[in-house]
Each structure stands twice: as structure tokens, then as C-alpha cells.
Image (spheres, rainbow, N blue to C red):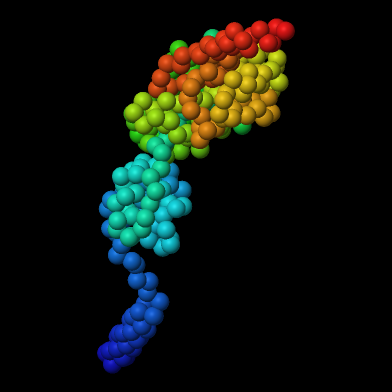
Amino acid sequence: MTQTIIWTIAIIAGLGLLLAVILYFVAEKFKVVEDPRIDEVEKVMPGANCGGCGFAGCRAFADAAVKAPNLDNNYCPVGGNEVMKKVAAILGYEIAEKAPQVAVVRCNGSCEARPRTTEYDGVKSCKVKAALYAGDTGCAYGCLGCGDCVAACQFGAIHMNPETGLPEVDETKCTACGACTKACPKHIIEIRNKGTMPKNQRRVWVGCVNKDKGGVARKACTNACIGCGKCATVCKFGAITIENNLSYIDYNKCKACGQCVFACPTHAIQFSGFEPKQVTPKPAPAGEQANKEA
């Protein structure tokens, strides 16, 4: 009996040793050697793990950056240019600075401009609300007001204004990570360049995403874009286009002159960083005027 027990223990021990040796050689053969630069890059990252870079977190971004041939398609919006310079220095890459960006709310349909037509008494979630119906106002495109964007922001950069019922962005806290844009089922939040001038960050955008025809859109919200095209007519830089009854301002072309703000009959165009001044066209010289009259 004793001999049987001893042999059993010996066999089990031998099998265990054999399996350990096999596992060791397998591990050595298939082990993945991780580039030490991944740790270096991760250390200079902000550690927000917000996903604004398009990866699951800072570690995943660091891994992708190390494996990439350059940094053209890798950018950390939270750390911005300063962090990317450090990453480039670690990896020995060249990097071009990008213009700072910020989230803007493309809905100006306040409680006063966009009165309620129904009363919602369900779960306080824009996502749930959007799945149930178009919204509790006449506009099927505007903000639903439940604050999903506020909950998604890790930096406390968005809050709901109780008077207007709309989200407002604190530009000093916004990192342009894009979490709010993903959280909004109506897609009214857009990441745009902060402005045309670095010091005062002038920018102009259309605070509306309503694609209904002018009369329908205006009936639902007095601040809606009606696609009249007056803004595009006064723009000297070709920055404004009209598509699907809706104006859109290309921030890459916009010079923030502000003339479209005055041209808009519904005040749908929003601005930040400056006070627009209306430019009065200069009268034609007397000689030219006489020729026109003749």
C-alpha cells in the first residue's frame, strides 16, 4: 500500500515536471517581446483613457504609435501638441502641429424658441428618448435636453443651461476628446477648430442641424436655419455651403469676418471669441455712379 502511494506521488511529480518543461519551451518559442518604447510613450500620455484618439486607452495609443511608420494618423486631443511633441521625440518622428479644437453645440433651439409639444416622462436619457420618438418639440433634429453629453464628459466641460434647456461647453475645460459627440444621438455637437486667430480664438458656426424646408423648420423653432442662402451670398471666402436646406460653415475657409451673422434672418449663426462688426459697402465713385445712371 505504501509502495503504491510512493509510486503515485512519483508519477504525478514526474508528469508535473515534464509539463513544466514543455510549457517553458512553448512560452519561450511563442513569447512576444514588447517594445520598451511603449512604456515610455504611455508615461508622457495624459492618462485620461477617454478614447478621443480612437483607441481603447492611452496604452493602446502608445502601442499603435510605436508600431506606426509615422504619427500622421495618431493624435491625442487631450494632450494636444505638447504631448505629441514628447511622443515624437521618443520615437524619433517628425510631427506637424495641429490647430487646437473645441466642441460646439449646433442647436440654438432654446425653450423660448422651440416650445414643447409633448411631455416626456421616461428615463432621463437622450439615447432612450431618441429611440422612442423624435422629441418633445416640433423639431425632430434638435437637442433632447437629457444631458447624455454631460454624463459622457470626463473633464466637466459641459453643463445643461436650465433656462435654455441646452448644453453649454466650457472652452477652458474642453479637450476635444469627442466623447460628447458620440453620446449625442442627434449629432448636434461637433468638434471644430477653436478659431482663426490663436489669441482670441474667433470662430463662427451654424447653430442648427434641421434639414426641413424653411417654413417647416421656422415653425418648429424660431432660431432654425431656413436655408435661404443669405449667409453664403455675403461670404467672400466661399466658406458657406447650402445642402439639404441647411447652411454649413467650413472652418478651414472661414475667416471669422462675421458678416454672415448679420445676414442671417433667424439668428441661427453663432459666434465666439469676438464681436462681429457689420461692414457697410463703400459707395461707388461719382464717375462710376454717373455711368451706371446713364
Name of the residue lying farthest toward the bottom: 3
Q: Nearer the viewer, residue 150 or 221?
A: 221
Residue ID at (42%, 25%): 202
Name of the residue lying farthest toward the front: 287
Taking the image as shown, residue 122 lies to the left or right of residue 88, namely right
**Image quarter (top left, top right, bottom left or bottom right) of the N terminus:** bottom left
Residue ID at (44%, 53%): 72
Q: x, y (%) of residue 127?
A: 55, 32
Taking the image as shown, residue 206 lies to the left or right of residue 214, namely left
Residue ID at (30%, 45%): 82
From the viewer's perspective, is residue 73 above or below residue 276? below
Q: Is residue 112 visible?
A: yes
**Image quarter (top left, top right, bottom left or bottom right) of the C terminus:** top right
From the viewer's perspective, is residue 236 above or below residue 118? below
Q: Nearer the viewer, residue 24 or 40?
A: 40
Q: Quadrant of residue 152?
A: top left
Taking the image as shown, residue 120 lies to the left or right of residue 273, namely right
Q: x, y (%) of residue 29?
A: 39, 80
From the viewer's perspective, is residue 176 above or below residue 33? above
Q: Quadrant of residue 159?
A: top left
Q: x, y (%) of residue 203?
A: 45, 26
Residue ID at (48%, 28%): 255
Q: x, y (%) of residue 171?
A: 37, 28
Q: Is residue 23 visible?
A: no
Tag count: 0
